[in-house]
Image (cartoon, grey):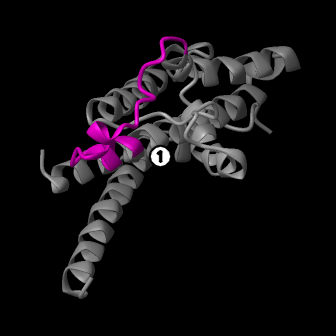
Amino acid sequence: MTHLLVMILFAALVSVVFCLIAKDTLKDRLLYGLKVFAEFVGIGLALAWILYFLPL
Amino acid sequence: MAETKDKARTAADVWLIGAAAWAFPGAGHYLQGKWLRGLLITLVVCGMFAIGLAFGGHLFGLGGKEALGASKLLQLPPTIANLGTGILYLVCWASNSGFNDSAEYAKLATFEYGNTFLLVAGLLNYLAMLDAFDIAVGRKP
């Protein structure tokens, strides 16, 4: 399993619990879950590219 | 003001629901008839725990012989996080499985991923426990 897939799996699982406990209606939960998932993956990818160019 | 059918719950019931939610992921929601929410919490927390162990991650505890003196304090936060999985942690502790952090495991590419999944599984269950508690006291629908 690649690093990217592990990150996506992690983001998906955490998003499920976050949306269940943070919102009360189905529509709000779906929207919030998708938003949290996109933020996890988007910020993860952005950080990965930033670190890629740093001479570490 | 909206009336809730849960108003009749006693303080003991509420604390019991909170304790059940910690002991088994999703149980606090099952006890209140929130079956789907409870099932999803069970699947996610138990799934993350299983994935964490499958990735070679290890559980933290305070009884390891490698941690001496004040350095044991560093083990405290991750131990608290791992303890959030309730009975899953206790079963592993009782059977002495999942605590192995030898070099053989540490060299696995997924070792740190495994640790992260195990830690976050416990933290998510703490959030689910608070959610079940809030529902029981009538703060949430």
Residue A55, percent from left and from top:
23, 88
How many neighbours does mark 1 have within 10 angstroms: few (below 14), some (14-19), or many (20 or more)?
Answer: some
Left/right placement of residue B90 relative to residue B13 reads: left
B124 or B110, which lies in front?
A: B110
B38 w.r.t. B94: above or below: below
Q: Is residue B10 visible?
A: no
Residue type of the residue flagged with mark 1: Phe
Q: Residue at x 58, y 34 (%)?
A: B65
Q: Residue at x 51, y 14 (%)?
A: B91
Residue B81, percent from left and from top:
58, 40
Q: Could you say whether the residue bearing mark 1 is in a helix, strand or loop?
A: helix
Q: Is residue B83 visible?
A: yes
Q: Quadrant of residue B21?
A: top right
| Count of labels in the image | 1
What residue did someone put label 1 on?
Answer: A18
Residue A49, percent from left and from top:
21, 78
Q: Which residues are magenta?
A: B94-115
